[in-house]
């Protein structure tokens, strides 16, 4: 069925922070690029992104006094949040990206902020790859991160940050996929794009074999966290983030998406979705939206996913 978003819902979404507004204009309204860019560029002056930029330490380029902790006010998680908001690269974020790369890179090419560890941590590596790529950092060492992720990819196609694991992690796999996507989008003339696409395809198959949220052993929900529609997800996995990733890459029709999309849409109330309480806790610089009420972020992402799915599935189901 063709997805038509009521004008009332569009207007409700637009009555928000510029980080939501520009994406609604681009992805739901198909507005002119110049108009979209003007709103996106305003994020440095007003709204959540501007508030976060104002909290950066101007001498150290850090947030929260740390690189990876405290959660969720550290440099890593603030930068990940700004990436999710879609803040365009600027001097502050580029400097912070370079700092994260300099301070976290290990000899094996992975990223880790535990000083006593000499090896990378795969979930963190995926996040940092996404951050430095999104901010278009020019550094040959980023190639080493690709090598690290290639070596860490497991036989089932995904990744797991836990040493000795024999099965990939949903959380780590999506973290790496988002990092690889940012790399491909920014360095789109890189000679390794075919190799990276092959890595992505294997990981896509891992997630799809599990229908994005099911246990490979029982077919039941693998974790209650996975079906919570929360934003921002931090390092956590949920079906909203996974589906939004797949619509981002504009992947083709696959019937294994159906269960996750139905589950997402069954949570809709009058065409809007609530922000469900996430399992993680910790201090935040900004509280975006209260849980258990209609969420602009979750609603926008669900509508964007449905727009993509309608296009891909029309005539097939």
Image (tube, rainbow, N blue to C red):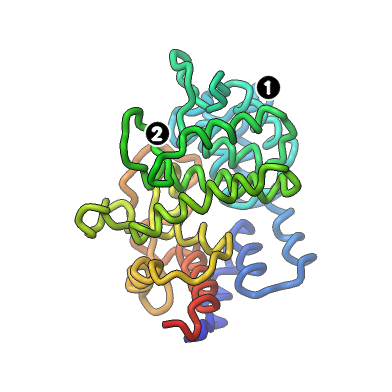
- For the question of whether residue 309 can be seen, the reply is yes
Residue 41: x and y in percent read 74, 53
* Dot 2 alpha-carbon crowd within 10 angstroms: few under 14, some 14 to 19, many 20 or more: some
- For the question of whether residue 229 can be seen, the reply is no
Disc 1: which residue: 59
Dot 2: element: loop
Residue 163: x and y in percent read 35, 28
* In this rendering, the label closer to the viewer, 1 or 2: 2
Please name whichever residue, 26 or 201, is drawn nearer the observer in this view of the structure. 201
At horizontal 48% and vertical 52% (from top left) the residue drawn is 288
Disc 2: which residue: 161
Figure disc tally: 2
Please name whichever residue, 91 or 133, is drawn nearer the observer in this view of the structure. 133
Instruction: Decide: is 94 above or below 118.
Output: below
In-image side of 187 versus 179 (left or right): right
At horizontal 51% and vertical 53% (from top left) the residue drawn is 201
Looking at marks 1 and 2 on the same chain, the residue that comes earlier in the sequence is marked by: 1
Instruction: Decide: is 19 above or below 189.
Output: below
Q: State if disc 2 and disc 1 touch (CB < 8 Å).
A: no
Residue located farthest toward the right when viewing the structure as drawn: 34
């Amino acid at each position: 069925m063709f997805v038509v978003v009521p004008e009332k819902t569009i207007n409700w979404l637009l009555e928000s922070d510029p980080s939501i507004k520009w994406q609604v204009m681009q992805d739901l309204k198909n507005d002119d690029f110049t108009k979209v860019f003007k709103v996106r560029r305003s994020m440095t002056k007003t709204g959540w992104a501007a508030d976060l930029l104002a909290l950066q330490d101007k001498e150290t380029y850090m947030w929260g006094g740390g690189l990876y902790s405290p959660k969720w006010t550290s440099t890593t998680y603030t930068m990940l949040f700004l990436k999710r908001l879609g803040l365009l690269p600027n001097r502050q974020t580029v400097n912070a990206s370079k700092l994260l790369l300099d301070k976290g890179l290990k000899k094996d090419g992975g990223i880790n902020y535990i000083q006593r560890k000499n090896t990378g941590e795969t979930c963190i590596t995926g996040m940092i790859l996404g951050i430095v790529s999104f901010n278009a950092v020019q550094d040959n060492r980023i190639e080493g991160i690709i090598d690290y992720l290639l070596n860490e990819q497991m036989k089932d196609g995904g990744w797991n940050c836990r040493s000795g694991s024999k099965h990939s992690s949903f959380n780590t796999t999506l973290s790496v996929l988002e990092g690889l996507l940012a790399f491909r989008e920014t360095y789109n003339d890189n000679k390794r794009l075919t190799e990276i696409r092959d890595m992505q395809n294997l990981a896509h198959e891992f997630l799809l074999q599990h229908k994005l949220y099911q246990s490979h052993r029982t077919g039941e929900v693998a974790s209650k966290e996975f079906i919570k529609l929360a934003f921002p997800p931090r390092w956590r996995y949920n079906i909203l983030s996974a589906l939004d990733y797949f619509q981002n890459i504009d992947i083709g029709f696959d019937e294994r998406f159906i269960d996750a999309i139905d589950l997402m849409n069954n949570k809709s109330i009058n065409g809007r979705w609530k922000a469900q309480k996430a399992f993680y806790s910790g201090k935040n610089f900004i509280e975006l939206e209260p849980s258990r009420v209609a969420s602009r972020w979750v609603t926008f992402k669900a509508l964007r996913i449905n727009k993509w799915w309608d296009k891909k599935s029309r005539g097939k189901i």
